[in-house]
Image (tube, coloured by chain):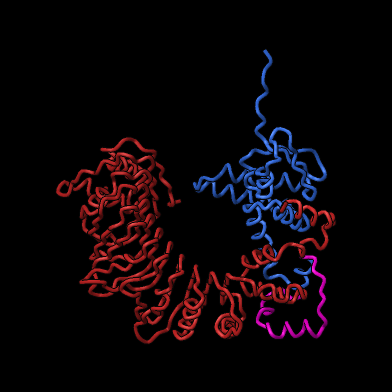
Amino acid sequence: MKMKKRQMKSEKDGNDGKDRLSDLPDGVLLYIMKLMKTKHAVRTSVLSKRWKDLWKGLTDYTLHSQDFISLSRFKEFVYWILIDRVHPFTLHSLDFSRHGCIGHYFLCRIIQCVAAHNVQKLTIHVNLDVMDDFELPINLFNCESLTLLKLSAQSITRMMVKCPKSLGLPVLKTLHLMNVTFTATYDDCADPFSTCDMLSTLIIDHCALRRGTTVLRISNSNLSSLTILDTLEPAHKIELATPNLSSLTIRSDPIRQLTACNLPFLEEVNITCRYTNMPNNPFIFTWLQLLADNVKIMTLCSRTLEIIHNLSTHDSTKAQPPCFGKLKSLKVYAYPYTKLSDDGISSTVAYLLQNSPQPSVVIINHRK
Amino acid sequence: MAKTPEPKRTISLKPCDGDVIEVSPMIAKQMQTIQSFIEDDSFIATTTIIPLPNVTAFQLSKIIDYLNYHSNSKAVADNVKESTKKFDEEFLKELEHDKLKELLHAANYLNVKEVLDFLCQAVADLIQDKSVKFVRKFFGVVNDYSVEEEEDIRRTHAWAFEGVEED
């Protein structure tokens, strides 16, 4: 029946291309608007009377200061569309990004609005010029509707932007945190994600542990993908209590300590080591031993191979590489500053895989 | 002994201006409008030809091309991503503005989400930052505001008209 109705309507339209797009249902026009920056969506109100209030049906806002001629104009716009709005409106997702420095009051007002509207997806990119350490507003983390949160809040005054000890966010599925500081939940251990019961993807990028906090514990029963970039220092320890983890990516200074629960589903491992002076501590073998059992796809950087190479040539530290029983593919990124020659890389790969069945090996050369 | 013919596995679609086009059930499934037809009790796969009075053969084959390419390249390897991007770019390059609009109509009529998503993004990219005049022309919108009314909107949303292409 539905089908017939649609046909009837469309036959009337005829086939002349002109004026056809305006016949598209509001849903499609709104969908197109959703894919534009909100500034441009609001601008369509000038097209004709039909378009005047169409944008008000938008539930997904993209507010980027880069699209405005000045930060004050941007602020005017944000207050008008979000903060000072008189009539009720629905907000499912907000992508807010502001260059320059934002006052914390402005940020708090936006978060207040987000919390009041049961937003499901939230992205915030801001720089703060706070004079003291800044606690991220707790009403953000009390938000029971958020399924996705991407938050980058950098203090240009080098103050800490602190996350609460425990994040809350019971239905959150994806979390991407940048430039924030974690505080100890108990003793010297930060365990902020254990309350996010639905979390499946976690990315921590350029974050920090507060002084005195030395352990980052990730305890989460649903987490399947974990990425930790440039967050850990050599003295830190990381504890994985993530039984469902299937993909792990770490880029860091070579931290010494990693402990993990049994990771029966871990199939993909990517490790990039930073270039720092470090002794030839066999930490990397301890790591690989922990992660080797089920891994199918592994990516290593040339620095990691250098460390393995040094270990292989120093009798005193000579350790046996683990058996990667299920490894199908090994990828090596060779960076310009590596001290290893092509031959050196090949022989180190052979050394690393000596106890494993032969996976396919790809060396991606960035040196040319 | 007479051979029983292979049961027909494809769905027959008849565009308004061309011959019947056969599509696999996999592709048909992605067109919600066709799917509801198939689920109807009166539908017989072997004989029923589904008429599409407001979809042209060109539009239908473009949509099928897109779905075919994308269903065959679901893998996420880097080189696949690259070639998919290239395919998408080529796909758009071949469409003039009018064709793009008509295809959007067809995709909406057939209710095929993957193509609709892709085309909506293309339209959004195309009209964003463009002058009001351009967007009116693109959408085929007739301006029914009085000069004063339009001026009023431009004044209240002044920030929305700054930093974009002038009329």
Whether residue B20 is in magenta: the answer is no
Name the residue furthest top.
B1
Quadrant in which residue B144 is drawn: bottom right
Image coordinates of residue A351 in percent, x first then y, are: 27, 41
Is A67 drawn above or below residue A26 in the view shown? below
Closer to the camera in the image, A133 or A19: A19
Image coordinates of residue B43 in percent, x first then y, are: 70, 39
Name the residue furthest left.
A316
**Left of A85 or right of it: where is A153?**
left
Quadrant in which residue B128 is drawn: bottom right
Quadrant in which residue B136 is drawn: bottom right
Give the letter of the red chain.
Answer: A
Confirm whether residue B111 shows in the render: yes
Span shown in magenta:
B139-167
Residue in the image at 62% along x and 80% along y: A69
Name the residue furthest front.
B41
Image coordinates of residue A211 in percent, x first then y, are: 25, 75
Chain B: colour as depicted = blue
Is B108 drawn above or below residue B137 in the view shown? above
Whether residue B163 is in magenta: the answer is yes
Closer to the camera in the image, A42 or A208: A42
Q: How many labels does the image show?
A: 0
Residue in the image at 85% along x and 55% along y: A14
Confirm whether residue A301 shows in the render: no
Image coordinates of residue A286 in percent, x first then y, are: 22, 51
